[in-house]
Image (tube, rainbow, N blue to C red):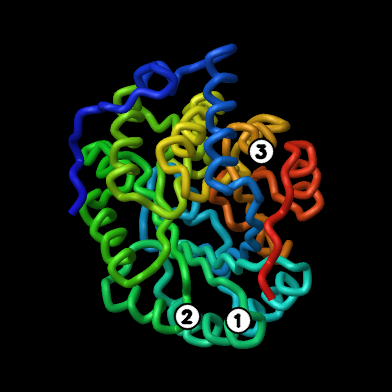
Amino acid sequence: MYALVAEPTERILGRPLPELIDAAGELQQELFAQARRIRQQHQMDQVRLRGVIEISNYCQKNCNYCAMRATNQNLDRYRLSAAEILEIAAEIHRLGIGTLFLQAGQDPECNAILETVIPEAKRHFGLQILLCLGEYDRATYHRWRALGADSYILKFETSEPERYRQIAYTPLTRRLQCIRWLQEAGFQVGTGNIVGLPGQTLDTLVRDILLTQEIQPNFASSSPFIPNENTPFSQLESGSVRRTLNMMAIFRILLPQALVPTVSALEKLETGGQLAGLNAGANVITINFTPPQCRSKYVIYSEGRFVVSLDHARTIINQAGMTVQPVAI
């Protein structure tokens, strides 16, 4: 199991982590420049594209920040069929995107669908399969790996056990155990935090960084909190884009081989937010391929979320002076 308490020892640019998490102005630009240098030195300078299909908005959990929470009676629920998912996967492949990203609430009813989708998408399209489906037992993770899934995202959200329990109503130790099981099963694993959760401090964010370092993920993600309709957190303020970008840059510097996504929530909060993410050291963009009639029901970031298109991704990649990583044939 991962430790939940550690002392910060890292200094970047000669500065302690709390100062860098809160950096602005010249210091922030210096931090971003260092992140870009590290990205280039480790040959992580091409942008990976992922094509996401949000396959279900059912969820067993009741997290206070998410409108897909089990007790939200105002949400029109949906679940895509294997045939629908594979039809979209064919389009993702046709567009030259090499990773099929299957995302859902924690919905065990998807398991039977995945039994068909994962091997078929591998066999017919040669796609890398990335899953983000929540907490399951060890046997389920091993089964998905055996079917051909390559990677899995399970963010710990916050490194503070009591705060996590107050938000998610389940123990953080369970979340971290699932991450360990995923690594043991041979997945490439992504994790990370949410910036701006209630009660969060700079010390919390430092502990988030230390926990991420201990996990040593293949993908390290930081996202800003966005207040969501039909949740207990609906009236709270959004998380800081500035701090989120700084966290991304720190992840890039401390985990130079990790993939760091520039998430759509950045663009939701600030026009140009995803481009700023690339300039802060990120090298992953996720393109949304969820059917339009379902997209508005996948309310992970609020009803008016920003939906990333392929054209938008190409534009900001070009503006950042970067290129798309070619897909191996």
Marks 2 and 1 close (CB-CB < 8 Å):
yes
Q: Tell me where residue 304 sits by quadrant.
A: top right
Q: In the rendered structure, which disc, 2 or 1, sits on the residue that comes first in sequence?
A: 1
Image quadrant for the C terminus? bottom right
Disc 3 to disc 1: CB gap under 8 Å: no
Mark positioned earlier in the residue sequence (3 or 1)? 1
- Residue type marked 3: Gln
Give the residue number, with chain letter if any, for mark 1: 121
Instruction: Give the amino acid at mark 1.
Output: Ala
Residue at image position (27%, 71%) is: 137
- The quarter of the displayed image where residue 101 is located: bottom right
| SS category of the residue bearing label 3 | helix
Q: Is residue 268 visible?
A: no
Q: Mark 2 points at which residue?
A: 148
For this rendering, which residue is in front, 198 or 74? 198
Place of residue 22 in the rendered image (x, y in percent of width and height, measured from the top left): 45, 18
Binning the other alpha carbons within 10 Å of mark 1 as few (below 14), some (14 to 19) or many (20 upward) gives: many
**Left or right: residue 163 compared with residue 127:** left
Mark 2 surroundings within 10 Å by alpha-carbon count, few (fewer than 14), some (14 through 19), many (20 or more): many
| Residue 183 location (% of width, % of height) | 32, 64
Mark 3 sits on what residue? 274
Residue 327 image point, x, y percent:
68, 67
Task: Look at the picture and state if 304 lies above or below 245.
Answer: below
Q: CA separation, marks 2 and 1?
A: 9 Å
Count residues near mark 3 (Cα–Cα under 10 Å), then give few for <14, some for 14-19, many for 20+.
many
Which residue: 69% across, 36% down? 275
In this picture, residue 130 sits left or right of residue 176: right
Could you tell me which residue is drawn at 42 percent across and 63 percent down? Answer: 188
Residue type of the residue flagged with mark 2: Gly
Label 2 – label 3 distance at C-alpha: 31 Å
